[in-house]
Image (cartoon, helix red, strand yellow):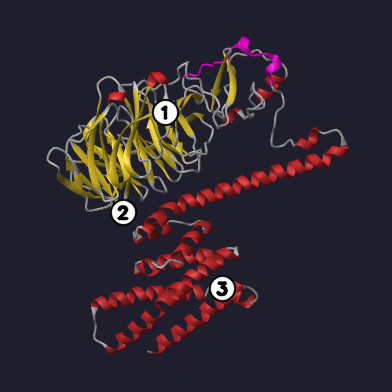
Amino acid sequence: MSRNLKLGEIESQTKIKIAKFSGQNSRLFTFVDDQNQIFINKIEYSKSLSELSIQNPFNQQFGLSQNEITSIIFSQSENELVIGSNKGILTYWDISTQKILQNIKGHLSGISCLSIFPNDNNLLISGGMDSQIKIWDSRQQNNGLTLRSHKLQINSMMVSQDGKLLASGSNDGCVKIWEMSTQKQLASFNESDWPICCVQFNPVDKAVAACSDDGCIRYWDVDRLSLISQTIPDKQCIYQIKFCENGQQLFSAQNFSLKAWDMKRDGLLLDYIDSQWKCILDLNVFDNKDIVGLTTQNQTGLSIFGTKMNNINNEKHIYRNHSEKVYGCQINDQCYERHSVNVLKPKNTQIQGYGNILEEQGFQLCNNNSNKFLPTSQVAQRINYESVIQEEDMKQSCLDLIISHDEVNLSSFVIDDSNKQKFKQMDQINEILKDHSKVIQILNQRINYMKPIMHWWSNNNIKSAVNAINQLSEPSILFDALLMCAQSQKFKSIPMEQLPQLLEKCKILIDSKYLSHIKGGLLFCYKTFTTYRDDIQTIKCFNQMSKVDLSREERIAKYDKIVEQLKQIIQMSKLTKLIERNKIEVSDLAKKLQIEMLSLLKRINQL
């Protein structure tokens, strides 16, 4: 029988896209459907979760937004509800009167997440799809303070318990720590290229945890600005993470499982709870004894799941036989199961000979065959570090003395010449695997950059998408973005004043050494040319036969900038060399663009 039970359900014919608890220990929650209807409910129970009931103080919906809602949060006092929209507008609602108090416009594009100050009811923080973070004071009608450092959309933010620090996680894979008094960045943790899903401060220690799309949880010391521990990446995406009040355990919510971790003890997995939940929208801990999650199983309706904390890490619930890979580690003669890539360094051990020599060379000993040896510089250290491996537990017979290093290959250890070829092949395979991991890393980086651009483009926020493209400089990512624009039916929706900037980016692709990049740049240029060729000729001709019109003059000025950029492109030396080769597909496209553009310029000059 599952320990994480379904406790209640709110039926709905519409899809639920956002759900949010008010705060730690608060039983008030809100959710939003795809019609942008806002609902507020409250969880009630006296002693047992099994007695849980859901109250709706507003009978049906609380309110309806005119804009698409992308984020929502309660104020610290729970008297107001703050809503972020896809147009970058913040809306403050009074919960008691169900009326809008104020609207504030600040972000260039949609607001992706919101966070409140734990000790100030007037301050609010918003993170945008434009990669900016803004700090708002509801008492002041201004644009707020802006924090700039992330490169992509902000996904999660949290203010520390004392209100002095802010942690932010983004699609760029970075977790950044900010000092709120000075609005300065203190640290940037970028151990992963995967988008950050959720960040959480430890309520007791100066430490922050974050989960990313690779299914890994990382835990950093905010004082030392160093990694303490991390879990092994998981195939299942982690939706939410949450600390209990004493900061000793961290809970992570994934499809069909709830896990409890001790992040101080090297990312030790304490318990694994099977569950029927999926698509977890929010997670909360009530009175430090009950864990409750808001989920949307099939996107329609909202389900509430919960489990008692005294059922977690209990001796009668032994964690066994699940599909994940588990590493065993012998600590103080007790067998624990853990998910971690880190190895604790023995303290004050008396290992002589090879052990001391190896540690001086930067290697770390481990006492389990399945663990990898890591350089000491790569092993995260703990806050108030105390080794859990005692001197008497270290037995010489348990130690592995086979050490791997980049400068040593498998063939070096083989004495038999007949086997050398076999091991050389294994070395070659290892090199190929290294290259493969680099390719995967590059592809992931390209995907992370394209996600927000494609989101804005598909939601008809063309201006934001183009602004994001204009910030790119990496040819491979530019190629993805410009080719997407050129092949889309929305191409003519690109604001005319932004086209010259995109044509400027095409020059980067045309100057590339890769034919695919060159072709992508030429395709965008040719698409621009064929789309606006007739309009340019018509407006130029009409301008010669009519009186002066200011609006038409402005439009002509925009066309002139496009023509000037195309003129510069056909005069590029790289384009001339491509045409001279006349042997490849790209040469034909370059020649076609040059001839037709010259023909247009000739007709314009004759007018």
For the N terminus, the image quarter is: top left
Q: Let me know if residue 213 appears in the view.
A: yes
Q: Which residue lies furthest to the left in this view?
A: 97
Q: Mark 1 = which residue? A: 251
Q: Give the range drawn in magenta.
A: 384-399
The residue lying at 34 percent from left, 35 percent from top is 158
Residue 227 lies, in percent from the top left, at 49, 30
| Direction from residue 13 to residue 209 in the image, left or right | right
Q: Do the residues labelled 3 and 1 touch (CB within 8 Å)?
A: no
Residue, disc 3: 575
Question: Label 2, on which residue?
Answer: 108
Residue 194: image x %, image y %?
49, 43
Per the image, label 3 sits on a secondary structure element best described as helix
Residue 490 higher or lower than 174, as above or below: below
- Magenta span: predominant SS is loop
Tell me which amino acid carries mark 3: Leu
- Comes first in the chain, label 3 or label 2: 2
* Label 2 secondary element: loop
Residue displayed at 53% across by 79% down: 592
Identify residue type, mark 2: Leu
Q: In this view, does 192 lie above or below 593?
A: above
Give the side of residue 121 with respect to residue 313, left or right.
left
